[in-house]
Image (tube, grey):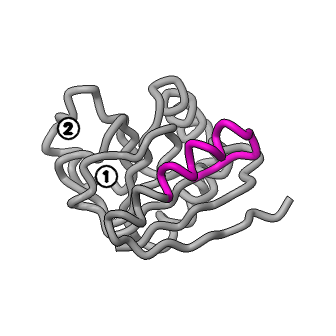
């Protein structure tokens, strides 16, 4: 299992939107986890994109239950990894997402804020303890 820390992300939601487009263009499925307010904003942004850039997505409710007809949706937005599982998880949140048993790769998005970086270091240590392969990616400014 792999985790990539994307450091110095100037705009986590904008960066997540670009990654979501890239993942979808590659034919993959992903889940983005984080705070409700961030996910609601990202959900709105996804709907407002040019039709040529649209990424089919579903906003997962707190219960985690998604209607069966929506299960194949390529991008899920929720507070925690959902039951259906996706190979890729993008973490916008402050904490390490759990459970991770259905995830092959995690992308941790880390801003330039010192507190965000401190929380990221704690998550890094936890991934190390779990034996995950960790990569560092510096986002160019």
Residue 131 in the image, given as x and y percentages of width and height: 34, 71
Residue 101's disc number: none
Q: Where's the N terminus, which quadrant?
A: bottom left
Q: Is residue 12 above or below residue 60?
A: below
| Residue at point 21%, 50% (across, down) | 71
Q: Quadrant of residue 67?
A: top left
Going from N to C along the chain, the mark reached first, 1 or 2, is 2
Residue 73's disc number: 1
Which segment did they paint magenta?
109-124
Mark 2 nearby-residue class (10 Å; few <14, some 14–19, many ≥20): some
Circle 2: element type: loop
Pick whichever, 110 or 17, lies toward us: 110
Do the residues bearing badges 1 and 2 touch, measured as CB atoms within 8 Å? yes
Residue 11 in the image, given as x and y percentages of width and height: 72, 43
| Residue at point 23%, 56% (across, down) | 85
Residue farthest to the left?
A: 68
| Residue at point 27%, 56% (across, down) | 100
Q: Does the magenta portion include 112?
A: yes
The residues bearing labels 1 and 2 have C-alpha atoms spaced at a distance of 10 Å
Mark 2, residue position: 66
Mark 1 nearby-residue class (10 Å; few <14, some 14–19, many ≥20): few
Circle 1: element type: loop
Q: Does the magenta portion include 46?
A: no
Pick whichever, 128 or 42, lies toward us: 128
| Residue at point 86%, 58% (across, down) | 141
Pick whichever, 132 or 45, lies toward us: 132
Left or right side of 33 for 130: left
Predominant SS of the magenta segment: helix
Residue 25 in the image, given as x and y percentages of width and height: 51, 69
Left or right side of 9 for 118: left
Q: Is residue 64 above or below residue 82?
A: above
């Amino acid at each position: 299992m792999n985790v990539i820390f994307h450091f110095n992300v100037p705009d986590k939601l904008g960066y997540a939107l670009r990654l979501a487009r890239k993942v979808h263009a590659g034919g993959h499925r992903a889940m983005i986890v984080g705070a409700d307010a961030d996910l609601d904003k990202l959900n709105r942004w996804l709907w407002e994109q040019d039709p040529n850039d649209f990424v089919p997505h579903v906003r997962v409710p707190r219960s985690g239950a998604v209607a069966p007809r929506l299960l194949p949706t390529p991008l899920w937005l929720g507070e925690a990894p959902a039951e259906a599982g996706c190979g890729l998880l993008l973490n916008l949140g402050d904490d390490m997402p759990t459970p991770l048993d259905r995830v092959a790769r995690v992308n941790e998005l880390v801003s330039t804020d010192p507190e965000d970086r401190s929380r990221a270091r704690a998550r890094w240590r936890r991934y190390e303890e779990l034996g995950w392969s960790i990569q560092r990616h510096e986002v160019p400014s």
